[in-house]
Amino acid sequence: METNLIPVEAICAYHHVEINFIQSLEDFGLIHTTVKKQSVFLPIDELSKLEQYLRLAQDLEINLEGIHAVSHLLNQVQDMQDKITLLQNELNYYKQLNQH
């Protein structure tokens, strides 16, 4: 087994969640799983997203449609933060040029 894949069954047991929930997240396009030898695995780089969605569902009792909407909004916020950082870097560059 590849070390960058986690069996979905182990995740379900650890987090006390049904495998149907993870399948539903994949159906909504929120996470991606891999099937190998008739077993379903989650790439390790998807684990933090899955745990975030689990917290939204379990702690805040948000349904799958709400999780999808929240995920979309969080992605938009992250994109805006990335653009702000880029613009700040450009502004700082031009300020430094102006000082010399």
Image (cartoon, rainbow, N blue to C red):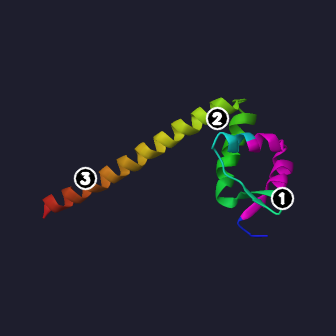
- The numbered disc on residue 91 is 3
Query: What amino acid type is highlighted by mark number 1?
Result: Gln
Q: Which residue lies under the disc numbered 2? A: 67
Query: What amino acid type is highlighted by mark number 2?
Result: Ile
Task: Specify the quadrant that holds the N terminus.
Answer: bottom right
Q: Which residue lies under the disc numbered 1? A: 38
Give the structural element (helix, strand or loop) at label 2: helix
Give the left or right position of residue 58, taking residue 72 as reference: right
Question: Within 10 angstroms of label 1, few (less than 14), some, or many (20 or more) residues?
Answer: few
Q: Residue at x 72, y 41 (%)?
A: 54
Query: What amino acid type is highlighted by mark number 3?
Result: Leu
Q: Quadrant of residue 45?
A: bottom right
Give the left or right position of residue 97, taking residue 12 as reference: left
Give the structural element (helix, strand or loop) at label 1: loop
Per the rendered image, the range of residues in magenta is 5-23
Q: Disc 3 vs disc 2: which is toward the camera?
A: 2
Structural distance between the alpha carbons of marks 1 and 2: 28 Å
